[in-house]
Image (cartoon, grey):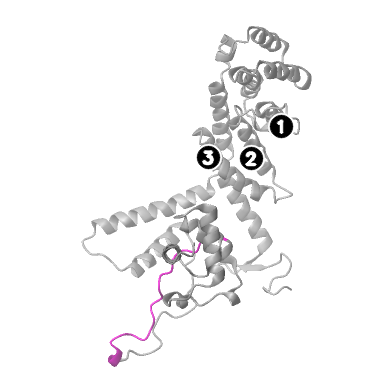
Amino acid sequence: MDESGYGENQGIISSTTGGKATFCKVECVTKSWMMDFFFLSLCRYYKENNTVKFGKTLRAFEVIVDEECHLQDDLQTKRTICCFLSRIMDGKNLDVRYDPNIKVTPLMSAISVWECLRTAVADLRLHDNIRNLIYVQCVGVCLEMGKVQLATETLQWLETETDLPQKLQRKLSTVLKKSDAYDKLLLHFSYSRLTESVNMFLDTFLEEHPSDFLYKSASKVVQIRQERSEREESSPTSHTSNVSEKNEENVISSKLNIRPKKKLFSTRSVHPWDPETAKKSLCVPRRTSRLKVSRLSFKDPSQEQDLDSRKHRKMWTYEEDQNLKAGVKTYGEGKWAKILEEFDFGHRTSVMLKDRWRTLKKHGKV
């Protein structure tokens, strides 16, 4: 038994129905939902050709998937599809490598991945069509980039390493002799047609393997909040924030069939009101700024000063001045937020850094 009270991966979670489940099993189910949501997002970003969001989501997806040693068959298939989509997205980036062999382009690497998905494609004609499109574009992209030698080497690789049809092989050889990037064959088996065919495959796959549990649940929450916001705008009287938040929780819980959370402490004032103070003795919690996810957020709590110390001015130390000078030297004057994030200044703010730098310049210390 560890310090948190859990055994090794055997933490017990009580459900609303009185049953119990191990934390390990709950974690597996939750991760499967998250992987489904990331997969759905990747398919969406692929269709939108949003390379930036696709790359960010793919990295998050990889973190979760690569930790799982034993994936279910459907999740393993979705992982393979994401591997295939990433290679199609980078198909025209000839400097990107997915294979130890530097001469293997992303599209060449996509061929073997696509063959692994043969059983996942309902229409075998669509599978063969996409495979032929990849064959042609492996050569076509090289010609489009003006790399005739690489296109020749690519065709040779296709002849020896893949099941390239002989008829298609002869046509590609003819295209290479002409070195024409606008040949009829390349225009017919175009890159845009390849992406559209992949879209057709994704639409069919998502119909047969829905991955939208988290998406639908989140959509209900968003819809409830929008309806609540519209009611508040049309209502002549406004409610207090506490009452509104409580009503929102009740509505969401009822629609999503979630048991309301129990409060750990009473919300009633323990101490009576003292008329002489003209204030209630119960303190109202202050709103604090959102903590930044950085190395400064993970210090030992025993070393952190009380938050109230921010109210009092604190003399600048020699170390803080040196950090400020080093930060300006590295990032330049005016990049106070970046300097504050990279160096240790305790509870100081970017405005404090700016004022301190002005003071140092005034006294000729910089």
Whether residue 212 is situated above or below residue 103 in the rendered picture: below
- Residue drawn at x 53%, y 25% as measured from the top left: 196
Q: In this view, does 279 lie above or below 249?
A: below
* Circle on res. 116: 1
Mark 1 or mark 3: name the one nearer the start of the chain: 3
> Which residue appears at 62% of the width and 17% of the height?
143
Residue at 64% from the left image edge and 40% from the top image edge: 78
* Residue wearing tag 2: 78
Query: Which region of the structure is painted magenta?
Result: 275-294
Q: How many neighbours does mark 3 have within 10 angstroms: few (below 14), some (14-19), or many (20 or more)?
A: few
In three-dimensional space, the C-alpha distance between marks 2 and 3, rounded to whole angstroms, equals 20 Å
Sort mark 2 into few (<14), some (14-19) or many (20+) by Cα contacts within 10 Å.
Answer: many
* C-beta proximity under 8 Å, tags 1 and 3: no
User: Vertical placement of 349 versus 140: above or below?
Assistant: below
The reply, left or right, for residue 36 in relation to residue 155 is: left
Q: Position of residue 32 (x, y in %)?
A: 62, 50
Q: Nearer the viewer, residue 25 or 282?
A: 282
SS at mark 3?
helix
* Residue at 71% from the left image edge and 15% from the top image edge: 152
Q: Which amino acid does label 2 sit on?
A: Lys
User: Which numbered disc covers residue 52?
Assistant: 3
